[in-house]
Image (cartoon, rainbow, N blue to C red):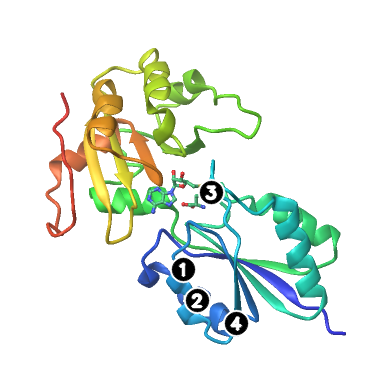
C-alpha cells in the first residue's frame, strides 16, 4: 500500500485570512484533519473533502493524550492518508511539533511543515508595535511561563537579555511572573496583554510591568493571551489604532 504523509499545518492565530496560500492548498489536498482546540474550527471549510477529528490539548481541560495522537497519525499515514495536523499559531512554537516529528520519523512516516503566524506576531500587529524596535532592544525572546516539568523559566536571565519578552501561557500566573520579573526590571517597563490576538474578539491592554497583574485581572484577561514586556512595547502607546472597531482596552502606563 502507498505510504501517506503528515503535514503539521500552522493555522495562525484564528482569522482564516491569516493562513498562508500554502496552507490553503495543503488543506484542499488533505484526507484527514486532526484539529487542535486553539485552531479555528472553520478551517475545515477549506478541506470539505477531509474527515475531521478534533484532538484538543488545552491546558487544564480534558484532552486527547499525546501518545494517542501520535499513534493515530502514524496509523492513518501508513494506510496511505495525507494527514494534516492543524495547530494554532505557528506549528513550531510551543506546539509539541518536535515530539510529533520525532515519533513520525521513527515510524518512517514522511512529515512536512507549513508555517503560519504565531500569536506574538498577531499581538504585536494589533498593538501597532515592532517586537524588535532597534531603539529599545536587540531582539525578542519567545518563552513559555509553563514548563512541562513544572519549573519556571530563568526570569533573571531572560530579563538580563534586554530583549522584548513574548510570554506564552503566562496569563494564569501573571501575579507570580510579574513579581519575579520586577526583581530584575523597572516597574515602569512597558508591558501588554493581548487576548485572542488576530481574531475578531481581540482585546488589548497596554500598561507597565508594575501594574500588569492588577490590570490583567481588572480587565478579565484570560487564556488564550500573550504577555509582552520590554521597552519596545512602549511604542504601542504612541501609535493610535487604525481599527477602532475592535474591543480595545487601553490603559496608560503608570
Ligand atoms: N503555536 C501557538 C502557541 C501554542 S501555545 C502559536 O504559535 O501561537 C498556547 C498559547 O499561545 C496560549 O496559552 C497563548 O499564550 C498563546 N496564544 C495562542 N493563540 C493566541 C491568540 N489568538 N491570542 C493570544 N495568545 C494566543
Badge 4 residue CB within 8 Å of ligand 1: no
Please name whichever residue, 222 or 211, is drawn nearer the observer in this view of the structure. 222
224 or 61, nearer to the observer: 61
Q: In 3D space, how far apart are the residues under numbered discs 3 and 2 (Cα atoms)? A: 19 Å
Find residue 58 and name its label: 3
Pointer 4 with pointer 1, Cβ within 8 A: no
Crowding near the residue tagged with mark 1, few <14, some 14–19, many ≥20 C-alpha atoms within 10 Å? some
Task: Tell me, yes or no, whether the two marked residues, 2 and 4, touch with CB atoms within 8 Å.
Answer: yes
Q: Cβ–Cβ below 8 Å for labels 2 and 1?
A: yes
Q: Residues within 10 Å of mark 2 (few under 14, many from 20)?
A: some
Q: Residues under labels 2 and 1: Cα distance?
A: 6 Å
Mark 3, residues whose alpha carbon is within 10 Å: few (<14), some, or many (≥20)?
some
For the point 42% across and 20% down, the residue is 176
Choose top left, top right, bottom left or bottom right for residue 160: top left
**Dot placed on the residue nearer the N-terminal end, 1 or 3:** 1
Compared with residue 220, is residue 14 higher up or lower down, i.e. above or below?
A: below
* Residue matched to label 4: 50
Q: Which residue is mark 1?
A: 41
- Up-down relation of residue 123 to residue 191 (above or below): below
> Which label's residue is closer to the chain start, 3 or 4?
4
x then y, percent, for residue 109: 80, 68
**SS class of the residue under badge 4?**
loop
- Whether label 3 lies within 8 Å of ligand 1 gets the answer no
Using residue 138 as the reference point, say whether residue 58 is left or right of it: right
SS class of the residue under badge 2?
helix
Q: Quadrant of residue 49?
A: bottom right
Could you give the CA–CA distance between mark 2 and mark 4, rounded to whole angstroms?
Answer: 8 Å
Q: Earlier in the sequence, mark 4 or mark 1?
A: 1
Above-or-below relation of 15 to 22: above
Q: Which mark is residue 54?
A: none
Callout 4 environment at 10 Å: few (<14), some (14 to 19), or many (20+)? Answer: many
Furthest residue toward top: 183
Amino acid at each position: 500500500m502507498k505510504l501517506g504523509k503528515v503535514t503539521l499545518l500552522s493555522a495562525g492565530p484564528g482569522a482564516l485570512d491569516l493562513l498562508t496560500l500554502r496552507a490553503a492548498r495543503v488543506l484542499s489536498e488533505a484526507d484527514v484533519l486532526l484539529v487542535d482546540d486553539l485552531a479555528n474550527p472553520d478551517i475545515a471549510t477549506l478541506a470539505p473533502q477531509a474527515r475531521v477529528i478534533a484532538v484538543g490539548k488545552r491546558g487544564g481541560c480534558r484532552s486527547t493524550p499525546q501518545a494517542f495522537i501520535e499513534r493515530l497519525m502514524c496509523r492513518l499515514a501508513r494506510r496511505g492518508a495525507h494527514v494534516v495536523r492543524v495547530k494554532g499559531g505557528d506549528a513550531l512554537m510551543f506546539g509539541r511539533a518536535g515530539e510529533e516529528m520525532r515519533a513520525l520519523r521513527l515510524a518512517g512516516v514522511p512529515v512536512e511543515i507549513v508555517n503560519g503566524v504565531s500569536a506574538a506576531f498577531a499581538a504585536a500587529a494589533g498593538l501597532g508595535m515592532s517586537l524588535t524596535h532597534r531603539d529599545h532592544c536587540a531582539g525578542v525572546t519567545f518563552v513559555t511561563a509553563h514548563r512541562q516539568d513544572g519549573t519556571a523559566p530563568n526570569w533573571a536571565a531572560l530579563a538580563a537579555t534586554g530583549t522584548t519578552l513574548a510570554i506564552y501561557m503566562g496569563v494564569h500566573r501573571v501575579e507570580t511572573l510579574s513579581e519575579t520579573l520586577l526583581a530584575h526590571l523597572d516597574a515602569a517597563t512597558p508591558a501588554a496583554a493581548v487576548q485572542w490576538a488576530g481574531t475578531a474578539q481581540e482585546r488589548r491592554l497596554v500598561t507597565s510591568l508594575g501594574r500588569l497583574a492588577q490590570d490583567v485581572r481588572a480587565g478579565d484577561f484570560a487564556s488564550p493571551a500573550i504577555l509582552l514586556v520590554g521597552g519596545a512595547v512602549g511604542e504601542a502607546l504612541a501609535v493610535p489604532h487604525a481599527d477602532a472597531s475592535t474591543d480595545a482596552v487601553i490603559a496608560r502606563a503608570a
